Structures are given as structure tokens and as C-alpha cells.
Amino acid sequence: MSLARLLAPARVTVAADLRDKPAVLNHLADLIASADAALDRGELLASFLARERLGSTGLGHGIAIPHGRSAAQREALGACIITRAPLDYDASDNQPVDIFVGLSVSAAAPTEHLTLLAEIATVLAQESVRRELRRAPDAATAYRVLTGAGPGNR
């Protein structure tokens, strides 16, 4: 699955004024739940929180990929938040995080989960992508950067 199918401009937030991990996870749950009426926002949030208890999804370089699974989900869905200011997220490099790509997949699709996490991490590992995301003036631009349709196409 491509990031273009996983994300949608409506599930991208730029310059979010969120100040901590719970606020980010709540907002990601809201964005993903907005894509499918069958999804329960509370279940999504609980899934994200359970995963974070296992260890931070902050990967370093100012990025985190919170993720979880939902029994009600038919297809993988994602959302992206770029915060106005970086925040403490217990990332592996001990640096604050400002780019969050949330992912939720069907509980029945564990291999899809791993494949998508790898794809997201590969895109965000590119310094040029992170730089363009941080400069994105709006959600549409950030979406284009994430999906490879932006000025710095991969």
C-alpha cells in the first residue's frame, strides 16, 4: 500500500498546537476515526497507548510513528501531525519530536502492519522529506511531500 492510499489530506494537520504525547495520540485517534464510521475513537486511542507502554514510537530525528490495531478496521489508515513546536516524546535519540505519522491497521493483518511501518520509516528517514514537512504551510503541501507528489519528489 502506498502512503497516498494510507493518508488523506483531511487527516493531515500542520502547525498543531499540541503540547504532550497524550494530546498527540488523542488527535491522531480523532483523525483516523474520522475516516471510517465503524472505527471507535476510544479503541484507537487505547491501542496507541498500549503500544507506547511497550516503548516509545519516537524513532529519532524529530519523528514518531504511533501505531495500533483495531478489530473493526477493514483497511489500514494513517494520519499525520506536524506540531508547531517539538515536544518531549521519549524518542530513541532523546530529542523532541514534531512530525508524527499515526497508523492503524486491522488486528487481522499483522504483516501489513510491519510493511507499512517500514515504508513510513523509510520515507521519514530522508532529511529532505523532514525538512519539507517542517516548512509545509498547509496540510495539502504536507500530504504531497509525504506521498512523493511534492517538489522534492523521491
Image (cartoon, rainbow, N blue to C red):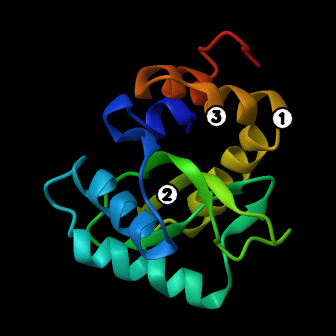
Q: Do residues under tags 2 and 3 come within 8 Å of each other at their CB atoms?
A: no
Residue 130 % position (x, y): 72, 36
Q: CA distance from mark 2 to mark 3?
A: 20 Å
Q: Residue at x 38, y 33 (%)?
A: 8
| Dot 2 alpha-carbon crowd within 10 angstroms: few under 14, some 14 to 19, many 20 or more | many
Image position of 85 (left or right of 76) = right
Closer to the camera, 74 or 51?
Answer: 51
Q: Residue at x 67, y 78 (%)?
A: 56
Q: Is residue 107 visible?
A: no
Q: Amino acid at mark 3?
A: Arg
Q: Amino acid at mark 2?
A: Leu
Q: Residue at x 37, y 51 (%)?
A: 75
The disc label shown at residue 127, or none: 1
Residue linked to disc 3: 134
Residue linked to disc 2: 103
Label 1 or label 2, whichever comes before in sequence order? 2
Quadrant location of residue 47? Answer: bottom left
Label 3 or label 1, whichever comes before in sequence order? 1
Closer to the camera, 86 or 70?
Answer: 86
| Dot 3 alpha-carbon crowd within 10 angstroms: few under 14, some 14 to 19, many 20 or more | some
Q: Amino acid at mark 1?
A: Glu
Taking the view exactly as shown, the residue that stands out farthest to the left is 37
